[in-house]
Image (cartoon, rainbow, N blue to C red):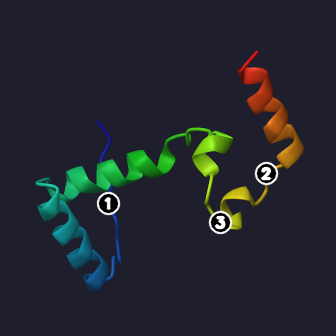
C-alpha cells in the first residue's frame, strides 16, 4: 500500500480534518483516504426526475437535448 505525505498543511485545515475523522470514528489517515476515494469516484449520472427542483448549477455544461434523448432511450 502506498504512503502519502502532505507538507505545509495549514493548522486550521488539519484541525478540521481531525474533527471530521473523530465524528466518523476514523483515524486522520483513514479519513483522508475516504475523502480522496469519494472525490475521485466517477459520479453517478443523474436522472431528470432526480433533478426536479434543483438549480441551474446542476445543468451547467449539460447538453439538454442529448440528456433528454438519453433519458428517453433508457425507457425503451
Residue annotated with mark 3: 55
Give how far apart the Cα atoms at labels 3 and 1 are: 38 Å
Give how far apart the Cα atoms at labels 1 and 2 are: 37 Å
- Please indicate whether residue 68 sits to the left or right of residue 28 in the image: right
Residue annotated with mark 1: 5
- Please indicate whether residue 39 sits to the left or right of residue 58 in the image: left
Residues packed near mark 2 inside 10 Å, few (<14), some (14 to 19) or many (20 plus): few
For residue 66, say whether it is visible. yes
Residue found at x 19% / y 60%:
28
| Tag of residue 62 | 2
In the foreground, 48 or 37 = 48
Is residue 72 depicted above or below 57 in this figure? above
- Please indicate whether residue 41 sits to the left or right of residue 12 in the image: right
Residue extending furthest toward the right: 65
Residue found at x 40% / y 51%:
36
| Tag of residue 40 | none
Residue 10, how many percent across, how many down?
32, 82
Quadrant for the N terminus, please: top left
For residue 46, say whether it is visible. no
Residue found at x 81% / y 38%:
68
- Please indicate whether residue 2 sits to the left or right of residue 25 in the image: right
Label 2 SS: loop
Quadrant for the C terminus, please: top right
Q: Compare marks 1 and 2 and give the one earlier in the sequence.
A: 1
Give how far apart the Cα atoms at labels 2 and 3 are: 13 Å
Amino acid at each position: 500500500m502506498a504512503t502519502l505525505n502532505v507538507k505545509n498543511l495549514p493548522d486550521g485545515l488539519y484541525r478540521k480534518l481531525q474533527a471530521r475523522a473523530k465524528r466518523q470514528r476514523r483515524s486522520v489517515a483513514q479519513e483522508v483516504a475516504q475523502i480522496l476515494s469519494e472525490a475521485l469516484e466517477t459520479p453517478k449520472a443523474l436522472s431528470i426526475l432526480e433533478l426536479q427542483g434543483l438549480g441551474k448549477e446542476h445543468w451547467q455544461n449539460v447538453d439538454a437535448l442529448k440528456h433528454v434523448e438519453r433519458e428517453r432511450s433508457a425507457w425503451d
